């Protein structure tokens, strides 16, 4: 957002003082899980455990794509009209 909107660094950094994460819900973000779909196996935990057992460091990545609601984060970044729309289910 910072780069796309060409917001000066001082203005962008000042926004951090106003950020309160009022609607932040980590449980909702983590609701989709293989535990519900892959015979009750937590595939991510299995991969992380295997990596740790071998002395490897693990990094997780979160994609901006959201296949259940539109506009998703990518659409909102790419399209000003999508950015202004309220979220709703894909039809």
Image (cartoon, rainbow, N blue to C red):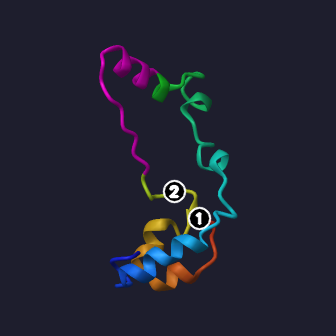
Q: CA distance from mark 2 to mark 1?
A: 8 Å
- Of callouts 2 and 1, the N-terminal one: 2
Q: Where, quadrant-wise, is the C terminus in this rendering?
A: bottom right
Q: Does 66 appear above or below 70?
A: above
- The residue that appears at 44% across and 58% down in the rendered structure is 64
Nearer the observer, 83 or 91: 83
Q: Which residue is mark 2?
A: 67
Q: Would you say 23 lies left or right of 84 here?
A: right
Give the magenta-colored segment's residue range.
Answer: 46-62
Tell me which corner region of the image, top left, top right, bottom left or bottom right, holds residue 55.
Answer: top left
Q: Are marks 2 and 1 in contact (CB under 8 Å)?
A: yes
Q: Which residue is mark 1?
A: 90
- The residue that appears at 44% across and 78% down in the rendered structure is 12
Task: Find numbered disc 1 in the image and state the secondary structure of the residue it sits on.
Answer: loop
Name the spot of residue 59 as percent of width and height, x first: 36, 38
Q: Is residue 69 magenta?
A: no
Tell me which corner region of the image, top left, top right, bottom left or bottom right, holds residue 36.
Answer: top right
Name the spot of residue 28 as percent of width and height, x first: 65, 49
Tell me which corner region of the image, top left, top right, bottom left or bottom right, holds residue 9.
Answer: bottom left
Nearer the observer, 75 or 27: 27
Nearer the observer, 22 or 89: 22
Q: Does 82 appear above or below 51?
A: below
Q: Would you say 86 lies left or right of 3 here?
A: right
Name the spot of residue 90 as percent of width and height, x first: 59, 64
Mark 1 neighbour class, 10 Å CA radius: few under 14, some 14 to 19, many 20 or more: few
Q: Does 30 appear above or below 81?
A: above
């Amino acid at each position: 957002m910072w780069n796309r909107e060409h917001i000066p660094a001082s203005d962008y950094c000042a926004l951090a003082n106003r950020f309160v994460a009022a609607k932040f819900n980590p449980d909702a973000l983590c609701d989709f899980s293989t535990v519900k779909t892959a015979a009750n196996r937590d595939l991510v935990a299995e991969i992380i455990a295997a990596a740790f057992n071998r002395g490897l460091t693990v990094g997780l990545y979160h994609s901006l794509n959201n296949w259940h609601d539109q506009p998703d984060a990518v659409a909102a970044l790419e399209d000003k009209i999508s950015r202004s729309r309220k979220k709703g289910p894909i039809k």
